[in-house]
Each structure stands twice: as C-alpha cells, then as structure tokens.
C-alpha cells in the first residue's frame, strides 16, 4: 500500500516529500521485498527513514529514486524510475480524487500542454512556493488557457471546469510525467498503462496483451502502405479507450498522412480516445471521434478498420448479435479496404447451433470479403483469461487467385511469440497479395486454404483448418520421418543386443542382499563427516540466467538439474565468460556430489566433473585419504535415503539442516561392496534406458505421422530367431 502524501500536502506552504514504505520501494524497483531490507543493511548510503507509520519506516521517494539511479540496483531503468515516482504521487491522491477524475484531468492537462505548447506550471528557481493562493492562481490560468485553446470543448475544457483548484498538484505531477517520459504522448501512455493500479478496472477490462496488439499491427501492413506514399484512413466503430488505434498510429512515423475515424457509445471513452490520438500525433483536422455507434463516414472513406467487438459475458452472449456487429463492419468496406475484427470464438470460429446465425455467417463467407479466420490463444485479454477470442480479416476486392477461398488458421495452442506473429502475418499478407498459387506458391505455416463452397456445404460447421498446414506436411522433418523411425528401430535393436551380450557376460542381476545379523551400524551425520574431514562441503555460485546457453563449454548444475526437472547439460556457460565475469567460480571435480534442499532434496553425482554449481545447490567432495573413506555413489545414495528430508507444502524452510541428516557409518569393506553394486545398477540402467529411449522415439514419430496423415502402416515384420 502506498503511503502517499500527508493530509496537508495539497495546501502546504512547501512541497512535502512523497513517502514510500519498504514494500513500495520493492514495487518501485521491481524486486522482492527482502531485497530492500538487504540494501538498507548492506549500503550505508541508503536513504534514512524520514518518518514512521504504525511502526513502519517511511522514506522520501525522491531520495530513494536518486539512490537507485546512482547505485544501479533494482530492475527498473532510470527513465522508468522517474515516471514511477510521478505515478506513485498520482496514486497517492486517490483519497481526494476518483480514479476517473485522475485520468481525465491529467489527460486534459497533458493535452492542453500539447495544444498550447507551454508548460503547465512555472517551477523555475524564481517560482513562488505552492500554497492555497498559488494553487488558485495556477488553476485560473489553466482554465483561461483551456477556454482560449479549446473553445468548442473537443479535448480538455469540460474536464478542467468540473474540478477546482485542489487539482493544482496534478498539473505539477503532469509536468513530472512529461519530464520523465520526454513528451506528452509518452506521459499519457504511461498513465493509461497504469489504469488498473489507479483502480480503473472498467477501463482496463477490454485491453489486449502487447503481443496481440503487435500481431494486429503486423496484419494491417500499415507501415509498408505509408512508405509507398499512400494516405490512409483508420477506423474503429468500437474504439473504447482507443488501444488498437493508438497501437496502429504508434507503429508509424508518417502520422501527417493518417486520418482517424472512431466511435463509442461512452462519451468519457470517446474523449479519452480523442486526446490519446491527438497526443499520438494525429492532427486535429484529421481526427473525428463520435459518441455513438456510427462513424462519420462523410469525413473520409476508411482504408483500414481495426475493431474489437463489445464483450458480453458467456451467459448473456448472443452469437447472432456478434455476427450482426461483424456484418456492420463489413458494410464499411470499400474496394481495397481491409478490416480486422476481434471477437468471441464461439461466434467467429465454433460450430453454430442457431440456423439464423449459421445463415448470416454463410452469407458473409459467400460475399467473397472474408480473407482469413484465425483462432487465437486464450489469455490475450488479461482481464478475461477464460475468454476465447478469434480474428476475422476482411478485404473488399480480393485478388482473383483468392476469390472463392478463405484462409483458416488455428494458433489457439501457440504462444504469441515474435516468431509465431511474424510467420502468421506472412501467411495472411502473402495470401492477401497473391492468393492461391498452387504448388509453386507460399504454403501457410498455420492454416489451410479452403473453398468457400466446402464451408457452405458444411452449413454452420466450425471454421477450423480441416488438416495440418501443407507446409507442415511437406516439411523436411515430416518427409524424413520414415528414415528417422528406421534409425530409431536400428538403435533399439543394437541396444537390445548390447543388453543381451552384457547379461550373457555378467549373468543375471544379483545384489547378494541378505538380512543383517547382529548389531546395526553406528549412526553419524553429514555434519560429523564434514567435521572429521571425511567430506568437504563447497558453496555454489550465483549465476545470472542470461549468461546461460545451450552450447557453452561447462555444464551448469542447479536445483532444476539435480531434482530432475531439467535435463543435465541443457544449461551451459561459456568458459571465457566464466573466467571474466565469475572469477571466483570453481569447477567441480569428477565424483563430486551436488545436492540441493530447495525446492526439495536432490542429489546428483557429477562423474565427469568440470561443471559449475549454481546456488542454492552445493557440493560435497569425498576425501579418499580419510581413515574410513566413503565413495561418491555411496554418499549420494545414503543422503537420498536419509529420514526427515521431506518438507511440508506450506513450509518456507526444510525441516532440518543438511548437516543434521543421519547416515549409517558403514565399514570400509561394506562401502566398497555397496559402491560396486551401485555401479552395476547404473550400467544396467544405461543399457535399459537406451532401449527405452529408442523405442519411445520410434513410437512418437509413428504416432505423429499417423495423426497428420503422412504415414501409413504395412504388414508387421516377423523376425524369427533361432
């Protein structure tokens, strides 16, 4: 919880500091809360607390920001820290202004600053300190400027008239935002990105992830079209807060050749959109945002329409209503115009039970304007993670090679990584530019080209690809499957022969285990073994995850590898980087035992050595010259079987320290026999694992080939062995 400003801050004779708790500082610097305690303990220059609140120390936000920038600690860059400080000051005023007042007033002030071309407040060295009289004078001056600049109340006047001089501190905070974000547009986008933190969940409910915004921008091909010298009109009949339009405008520098049409029934949202687009660089004369459901089409003909259909809960959602809204967007299309419509998958993609809805969707498909239908992954609307979205792209006047066909794509099981976005955008853009070209064309990576007549015959059927993409079927990986399966079968046969030969040579597995008679062996602990120097414990090293690759020189052993969550050898580090960045890091020796207690006990014997152990994992090195020596295999086996090593699911720490683990102190002869048995089981496990891996590989490839239809089965071969 942000502590904020004291009660007298708005009318104090001098600006008071923004006070942050240690939890606030952790959020501010993007670190865990205990990290701030560590900074305060280890760094003498950490800012001192300036006051307390219920026993919690409070710190001056400006001092903390300056210290973080000077020290370079934390995970936020200096520009973000300055913006965050201003944002914390804004959030601290929520007890005096509603979230809507904060967003609307600050947006209006930023817009006034852009329109007028002058700062909102004079904070120079000769400026008078803020007090009640100064606030009144400042606010009166801002209102006069707004009346002169925005006489028709298109952008700012209404919001500034609806509040009094108590909002003068917002003008100073707006200046701080501009200073940290370099311009008014950056300040406004930073403010809107924090709408949830301000308590405006209703304004954030329709927001999509940055990855989806990027995909929509790529599918419009806006930048390329502007680079060709075209002047374009963008439109959105369901603009809401203008997220999609702002993303498109942000993707180009040629904003003087962009005209924007938008509409939304909520007057508050239309004014936010209008201010947002003006600050993004769209000229006043090239901008028309209507309150209602209709665009002002007399203003300009749309070239690109990007829209998100209004969300309705599943209980109240009407498939027919969603398709009707989609039809309204289709009416906006003129020859050469492209539209992207985001909506519910149960209307745009799924099988339709309603005859009326199926007729409407079939009519849209037959109109030859549907370019592609894409099933999107869930979670791209963060506020509604259970909502399944889909995307239609529409084009009036498709290329002749695309007439009568539609591209169906399904990426619902994919993550919207940059690679997925680029490949999908290439599929759609090449289909838009070239259409179907047969075997010499571009095979979509995520979809199939389907005749509209086939979809019409399957009246109301799902709009999903009827088979895997052709590019997947004819890829090298698929065409090589028979050879890969034959190679796996050959490996299986060799591994089986090796196992049979080993068993013929060594005989069946016999551990010669028998019941112990007499006194049980003495008990010892790992701590006593370390004290007696029979075992040496060495620390692990803190290794930055960004320094790890798959092709380095040294294997990195961390908790994931030791507990089996990640294969050993998957994470590696370059030896030159290790020598320069981690000068004190020591490599393991062959036979070192690596163990971890977090998230649970895990033990691994590093037979090859020359690995880097990543904290919190540690190393146990057996002393072969001790009076009663152990072997690495025996030590690892006994540690893994020690009692009391489990941890309660709700426990923060293990039940006991590793030094307290009790082990039997076996006789040297018994240690040697135990080690030989463990070595024998490891050799047999390797032989069996080779068979299991080869069999699993052949099985996986066979199933994949039969599932996508690229493989078939002949008569099974019978092998007679004499």
Image: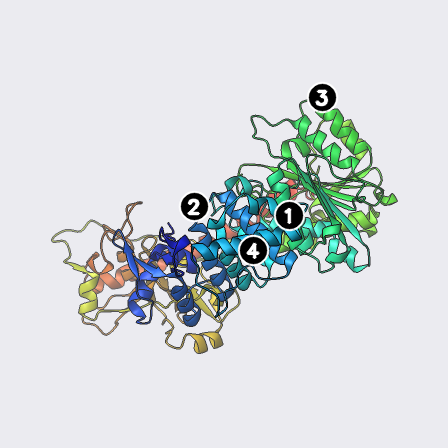
Can you tell which mark lies on residue 96?
2
Residue 706: image x %, image y %? 65, 41
Q: Estimate the x, y position of residue 563 in percent, counting from the top left.
A: 38, 55
Does dot 4 land on a helix, a strand or a loop?
helix
Using the image, determine if residue 56 lies above or below residue 544. Answer: above
Give the mark, 2 or 3, whose residue is nearer the N terminus. 2
Q: In this figure, which residue is indicated by the disc labeled 3?
A: 355
The reply, left or right, for residue 415 in relation to residue 586 is: right
- What whole-number distance in Å separates the C-alpha atoms at marks 2 and 3? 54 Å
Residue 692 visible, this orientation: yes
Looking at the image, tell me whether mark 2 or mark 1 is earlier in sequence order.
Answer: 2
Dots 3, 1 in contact, CB < 8 A: no
Q: Is residue 489 visible?
A: no
| Marks 2 and 4 in Cβ contact (< 8 Å) | no
- Give the residue pinned by disc 4: 141
Q: Position of residue 321 (x, y in %)?
A: 67, 27
Is 408 on the left or on the right of 317, as rendered?
Answer: right
Asked if marks 3 and 4 touch (Cβ < 8 Å), the reply is no
Residue sitting at x 47%, y 55%: 135
Residue at image point 49% right, 45% down = 196
**Total count of labels:** 4
Residue at the left extreme, as displayed = 519
For disc 1, the marked residue is: 155
């Amino acid at each position: 919880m942000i502590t904020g400003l004291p009660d007298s801050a708005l009318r104090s004779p001098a600006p008071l500091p923004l006070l942050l708790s240690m939890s606030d500082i952790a959020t501010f610097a993007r670190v865990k809360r205990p990290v701030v305690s560590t900074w305060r303990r280890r760094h003498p220059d950490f800012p001192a607390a300036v006051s307390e609140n219920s026993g919690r120390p409070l710190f001056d936000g400006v001092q903390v920001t300056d210290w973080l920038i000077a020290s370079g600690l934390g995970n936020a860059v200096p520009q973000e820290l300055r913006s965050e400080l201003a944002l914390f000051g804004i959030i601290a005023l929520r007890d005096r202004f509603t979230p809507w007042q904060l967003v609307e007033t600050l947006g209006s002030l930023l817009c006034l600053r852009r329109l007028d071309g002058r700062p909102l407040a004079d904070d120079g060295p000769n400026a008078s300190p803020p007090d009640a009289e100064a606030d009144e004078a400042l606010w009166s001056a801002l209102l006069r400027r707004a009346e002169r600049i925005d006489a028709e109340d298109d952008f700012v006047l209404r919001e500034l008239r609806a509040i009094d001089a108590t909002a003068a501190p917002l003008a100073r905070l707006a200046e701080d935002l501009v200073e940290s974000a370099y311009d008014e547009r950056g300040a406004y986008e930073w403010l809107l990105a924090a709408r949830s933190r301000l308590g405006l969940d209703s304004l954030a409910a329709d927001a999509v992830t940055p990855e989806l915004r990027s995909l929509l921008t790529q599918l419009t091909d806006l930048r390329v079209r502007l680079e060709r010298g075209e002047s374009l009109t963008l439109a959105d009949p369901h603009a809401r807060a203008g997220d999609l339009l702002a993303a498109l405008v942000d993707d180009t520098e040629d904003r003087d050749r962009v005209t924007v049409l938008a509409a939304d029934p909520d007057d508050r949202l239309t004014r936010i959109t209008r201010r947002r687009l003006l600050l993004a660089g769209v000229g006043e004369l090239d901008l028309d945002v209507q309150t209602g459901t209709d665009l002002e089409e007399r203003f300009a003909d749309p070239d690109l329409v990007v829209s998100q259909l209004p969300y309705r809960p599943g209980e109240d959602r009407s498939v027919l209503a969603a398709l009707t809204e989609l039809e309204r967007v289709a009416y906006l299309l003129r020859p050469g115009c492209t539209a992207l419509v985001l909506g519910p998958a149960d209307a745009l993609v799924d099988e339709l039970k309603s005859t009326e809805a199926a007729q409407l969707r079939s009519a849209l498909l037959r109109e030859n304007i549907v370019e592609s239908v894409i099933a999107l992954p869930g979670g791209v609307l963060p506020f509604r993670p259970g909502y399944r979205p889909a995307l239609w792209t529409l084009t009036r006047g498709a290329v002749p090679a695309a007439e009568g066909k539609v591209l169906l794509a399904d990426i619902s099981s994919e993550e919207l990584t940059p690679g997925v976005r680029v490949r999908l955008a290439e599929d759609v853009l090449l289909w838009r530019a070239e259409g179907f070209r047969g075997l010499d064309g571009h095979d979509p990576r995520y979809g199939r080209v389907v005749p509209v007549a086939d979809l019409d015959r399957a009246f109301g059927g799902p709009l999903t690809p009827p088979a895997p993409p052709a590019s997947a079927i004819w890829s090298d990986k698929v065409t090589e499957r028979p050879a890969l399966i034959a190679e796996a079968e050959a490996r299986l046969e060799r591994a089986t022969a090796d196992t049979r030969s080993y068993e013929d040579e060594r005989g069946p597995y016999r551990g010669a285990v028998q019941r112990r008679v007499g006194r049980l062996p003495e008990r010892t602990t790992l701590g006593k073994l370390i004290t007696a120097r029979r075992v040496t414990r060495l620390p692990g090293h803190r290794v930055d995850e960004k320094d790890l690759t798959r092709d380095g020189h040294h294997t990195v052993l961390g908790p994931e590898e030791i507990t089996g969550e990640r294969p050993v050898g998957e994470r590696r580090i370059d030896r030159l980087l290790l020598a320069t960045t981690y000068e004190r890091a020591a490599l393991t020796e062959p036979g070192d035992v690596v163990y971890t207690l977090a998230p649970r006990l895990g033990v691994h014997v590093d037979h090859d050595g020359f690995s880097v152990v990543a904290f919190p994992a540690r190393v146990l090195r057996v002393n072969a010259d001790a009076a009663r020596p152990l072997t690495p295999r025996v030590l690892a086996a006994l540690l893994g079987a020690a009692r009391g090593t489990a941890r309660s699911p709700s426990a923060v720490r293990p039940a006991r320290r590793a030094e307290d683990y009790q082990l039997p102190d076996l006789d040297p002869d018994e240690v040697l026999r135990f080690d030989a048995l463990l070595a024998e089981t490891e050799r047999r496990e390797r032989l069996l694992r080779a068979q299991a891996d080869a069999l699993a590989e052949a099985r996986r490839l066979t199933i994949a080939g039969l599932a996508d239809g690229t493989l078939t089965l002949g008569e099974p071969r019978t092998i007679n062995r004499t």
